[in-house]
Image: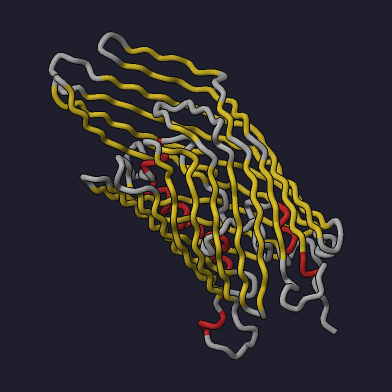
Amino acid sequence: MMRTIIKSIILFVIATSILRAQTDEFEPGSPYTIFGVGELNYSNSLRTRSMGINGIGLSGDYVNSLNPAANYDMSYTRISLNGKYSFYKYSDATSTGQDSDGKVDGLNIGIPISNEKGISLFLGFNRLSSVGYQITQIEQNTSGNETRFYSGKGGLSKINVGLTYKLANSVVLGAEYNYAFGNIIDSKKIDFGLQGVTNTDIRKEIDLQNSYFKGGAIIEIGNLVKSKLLKDLKIGFYYQTKINFNSAGDAIYTTSTSTDTVRITGEPLEFPASFGFGISNKFGNRYIVSADLLMHNWENFQSTKITVAKYENSYQLGLGLEILPLSESDVSYWNKLTYRMGVFYGKEYYSVNNNDINVLGASTGVNIPLTNQNSIDLAIMYLIRGKNSDGLIKDENLSLALGFNFGELWFLKRQEEN
């Protein structure tokens, strides 16, 4: 069984790579990734994403890629690999476009060292942001139609390692070191539509890298209050430091008079700090409800990109439900699955034409057990970003996600049966 799963993962990664290699130079994605560092990816767990949340207050037997403290509750070593295939639909007041693209989102490993002391080690390689857009704009002037082509690709990734520790019976702390790196390419071409006039071509490529830290806490409220209803109540907090990226790259300017290449070094780009809190509770033996709020301080962000936007503080709010399988052994196959669903709402970190860009979405998913500790996650996520009025673009995104989860007993001792 394990060999079959590993082969499936290899085929999944190869297939995704082939799909990406077959795309144009500039990859499909949301047109709004033209701004800032692209579309942000806070959490790579399919458990939390299919619940519509980021998992700030949700611990359990899985690897949480956002709140480091939430990783204390694993019973086995956990290895997870996630990816998705997305279908994009864009529309404005006059036209509609469609595209699709596949991505591998991340690989995470969580290793419990001591359940009694809440010590777990975790590490991962995850996508932090994605850039992929192609936009055509036609403007009329005294000489005729002027066509502007905007395109971009790239994004940021991170490598992380962290540790959790239980201070007391009810308080868990987590700390995480991250190294972020990536490459963002933006291009702007202006076709004047006139014979004898050289079109303008601007291409800017920036490499980014630096370290940052995250800290988090989980408070088990259920251990502090005498309430049967709240015995599994948990509250979570996390804080991520800002990233002062070291940047270097090239800008190529082609005009009617010359072609110039400018080397860019030391141009500042500060990825701002973020923080959030969440809550979760288990009702009965089967129902887990969780909600969280994430906030990101973008109002002082200075962009190095070709396109200028107004940057503002952003937030994400999510509410989700997880239905656990029945514990009895003689139940139907469908009662052995874990079901998840949720909704989310937020405001992006940029505004366009003095309009806030809001996001509304819903998600659902299922965890399918293969063996006692190995499983597959399936998820469907749908969101709407922006609107097709006031000179804006309505961005619709339907994503089909697939995740593989493996469980192994590494450092913990097996409990011997009497």
| Residue 110 position in % (x across, y down) | 69, 57
Q: Nearer the viewer, residue 219 or 48?
A: 219
Quarter of the picture holding the N terminus: bottom right
Q: Position of residue 250 (x, y in %)?
A: 45, 20
Residue placed most toward the observer, 83 or 219: 219
Residue 396 sits above or below residue 28 on the image: below
Position in image of residue 352 (x %, y %): 39, 37
Residue at point 66% right, 76% down?
A: 283
Say above or below: 287 vs 363. Answer: below
Q: Position of residue 90 (x, y in %)?
A: 30, 48
Based on the displayed image, in which of its 4 quarters is residue 202 positioned? top left
The answer to whether 334 appears left or right of 169 in the picture is left
Give the residue at x 57% y 75%.
323
Image quadrant where one finds the C terminus: bottom right
Q: Please, which colouring scheme is shown?
A: secondary structure
Of 258 and 363, nearer the camera is 363
The residue at 42%/45% (across/down) is 357
Of all residues, the one furthest to the bottom in this rendering is 330
Total count of labels: 0
Q: In this rendering, would 204 be left or right of 338?
A: left
The single residue placed furthest to the top in the displayed view is 257
Q: Quadrant of residue 243?
A: top right
Does any portion of residue 6 appear in the rendered image? no
Residue 246 appearing in the image: yes
